[in-house]
Amino acid sequence: MINKILKSKWIYFLLLIGIVLYLRENQLILNSPKYIFWVLFSISFSTLFVLEIRNKIKIKKSILDYFFVIITVSFFSIYMALILKIPINEYIIYKSQSEILVKKCKISNYISGRSDRLLFYFDDKVYSVGFQNSSHLERKKIIANFLLRVEYKKSILNTYVVQEYGLIKK
């Protein structure tokens, strides 16, 4: 079944649209429940696995063939879980309260590379955000002299939707 899907050209267009939609999410959701992804992954995996194995049972296959089926189904299940999570994330953003709260968070690390990332503590958990280091500050100076000011809204499932963030001096 998955082989038939991969042979059609429109699936690559749908994959591209899915990736663009996933990357388009510009609002950061903190404390997002991990079980949502795993439930969606489990449902996708079991559905695709049953459909794929049902087609393969008619033909005797080796263990290696079934291993490749599991790898392929796992890949598509991850993709489907990420795509199915987009409307859930949009609903979390939609249900966020109107009151904007502000918190000053300690920075735990700064990682520079292709994309610069700031790691910070928010309610005793470490999160990361993209960061444009236009002032070319050094890692040690950022960690020692700055805090991350986060403006956020509370939402459902004990999540927080970040509206804005930036560095401030200690």
Image (tube, rainbow, N blue to C red):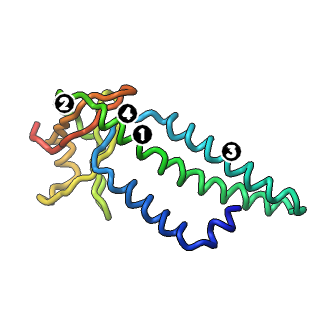
Q: Residue under circle 4? A: 31
Q: Residue under circle 2? A: 103
CB under 8 Å between callouts 3 and 2?
A: no
Q: CA distance from mark 1 to mark 2?
A: 25 Å
The residue located at (79%, 63%) in the rendering is 65
Sooner in the amino-acid sequence: mark 2 or mark 4: 4
Residue 101 can be seen in this image: no
The residue located at (41%, 43%) in the rendering is 87
Q: Position of residue 41 (x, y in %)?
A: 58, 44
Q: CA distance from mark 1 to mark 4?
A: 14 Å
Closer to the camera, 26 or 167?
Answer: 26
The amino acid marked with disc number 3 is Ser
Q: Residue under circle 3? A: 46
Closer to the camera, 137 or 89?
Answer: 89
Q: Nearer the viewer, mark 1 or mark 4?
A: 1
The amino acid marked with disc number 2 is Lys
